[in-house]
Image: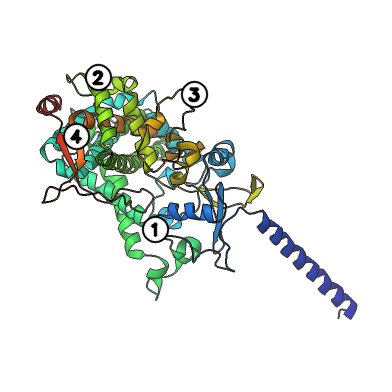
Amino acid sequence: MASPTTIALGAVFCAVIVRLLLQRGSQRRKLLPPGPPPLPIIGNAHQIPTVQEWKTYCKWADDYNAHKLLYFRNFGQSFLVINDLATAQEIFERRSTKYSDRSDMVMTFDLMEMTWNFGFKRYGDEWREQRKMFSIAHHPNAVHQHYEVQTRACGELIRALLHTPDEFEDHIAFFSGQVILNIVYGYRAKDRHDPFVELSELAQSLLNETNHQLYPVELFPVLKHYPRWLPGADFLVPWKHVDKARSVNAALVNEPFNRAVEDMSKDGTDPSFVQEHLQRLEEVTDPSAKKRLKTVVQQTAAVQYFAGADTVSTALSGFILAMSLYPEVQKKAQAELDSVLRGSRLPNFTDKEDLPYIGAVLKETMRWNPVTPLGIPHRSSEDDMVDGYLIPKDTIVFGNTWKILHDPKLYGEDFMVFNPERFLPKDGAAMPPDPVVACFGYGRRICPGRHFAMNNLFIVMSSILATFNIAKALDANGKEIEPGLEFSTGTVSKPEPFKARVEARSEQARKLALLEA
């Protein structure tokens, strides 16, 4: 039996260890970035917003002097929001080896079975292989091969707007969907209600619904094993939503791909990403390698199909909204188009360099209401010190794109105004950063389809402005209806439904559009 002295020494030793651990924890807490004070155990769980989170983070940045780094906790999980462009570039680009990983997205990745989407995959060999295949297909030197498809689809969009202008949202969504379906699968969608167009939209909607909720299973992944037939299971995991998402994701990955494989044996099939890569696989002799690579092709195709349409249509909806609110911007853009096109044709991709104001309108559209206000979260792979602050390992890190692109130090005090001229050269004035630096992500996680997306936006915006006047809708008494400036919550933030008048600028513009379309 231990002597009283031994017991006393043991107790003192334990007390010293506990004190040192507490001191170390206290010292670490003092090094954390500013943010709302946490409560014991739950942290800031009671304060974390579920609607337009980026705006709450902007308010917290002011409240807690967190204009660069904002820190908070949800139970045991650390979160960091970067509110400053220079800091975002430092963390995501210059320190990309520490911040290129993704968090364990239990709902999205495990339960909804989006393991095919490399945008959500952990940093590693699978991610590299899939991203490389995607990047080569959408490299700046390769995207010109899509001009014909984009121009043809844009012509169809213009013709549809001439016939049913009130349905502009549907026409824009169809343009975005049909372009990506043709380029990736060689499939020509028939109309707005084509099953493959609607399938992608449904998958995006389910993901958006998931990402603006915080489910208990995200904080405590072990709960995914909780039997779904026990009481409370639907609170821990929304099983009906999960089951539907699984079914939709499986269809999204398999159905258009299988259709493309079938069409390869038919004459007159349009060239596509799937066709090109499957033909290359014919040279692979190892059956197991061939099977694995076919899966990589199938999954990479699905990522393009999933991500390529919704973001473009959302940006174009924001563009229509802006044009209805800022007629003076529209007139300047049309004057530039008229000086280049001289009323003899619609714009094409060779006109880009001659249309700097249109380019500025495109940039301002991306800045004014960024499509992905918080992007997709990164994860820190080790402890790090940034500006004297500790970023703990496994912290979930967001770039607050909305705040960065509304920073008065970068874009002026009129940052809420749609003003393309901020992106035009002025004598002696420094140009603000191109919104592309923030709205398409950073570093190794930057969106590899950004060049393709920007081309889609250019051809549609310039063609619409060359053909149409956009104005506020009128009520039954002929008075203008003020559109609301409300945007949805989710990974992709869309303008809430609004009305606008889309009318041909002239009979000549109508005839020209019908002729070229």
Residue 51 is tagged as 1
10 Å neighbourhood of mark 1: few (<14), some, or many (≥20)? few
Mark positioned earlier in the residue sequence (1 or 4): 1
Residue 211 relative to residue 481: left or right: right
- The mark lying in front, picked from 1 and 4, is 4
Badge 3 or badge 1: first in the primary sequence: 1
- Type of residue at label 2? Ser
Residue receiving disc 4: 469
Q: Look at the image and tell me whether residue 73 can be seen.
A: yes
Q: Work out whether residue 201 or residue 116 is closer to the camera in this orientation and state it.
A: 201
Residue marked by disc 2: 339
- State left or right for residue 101 relative to residue 385: left
Please tell me whether residue 229 is drawn above or below residue 437 in the rendered image.
below
Task: Work out whether mark 3 precedes mark 2 in sequence or the reverse, and give the earlier one.
Answer: 2
Mark 1 lies on a secondary structure that is loop
Q: Residue at x 54, y 67 (%)?
A: 42
- Above or below — where is 494 with respect to 291? below
Q: Foreground mark, 3 or 2?
A: 3
284, 50: nearer the viewer: 50
Percent coordinates x, y for residue 198 in the rendering: 23, 47
Q: Is mark 4 on a helix, strand or loop?
A: strand
Kindly indicate whether the residue at mark 1 contacts the one at mark 3 (C-beta within 8 angstroms).
no
Quarter residue 242 falls in: bottom left
User: x and y percent of residue 409 in the render?
Assistant: 50, 39
Q: How many neighbours does mark 3 have within 10 angstroms: few (below 14), some (14-19), or many (20 or more)?
A: few
Residue indicated by mark 3: 428
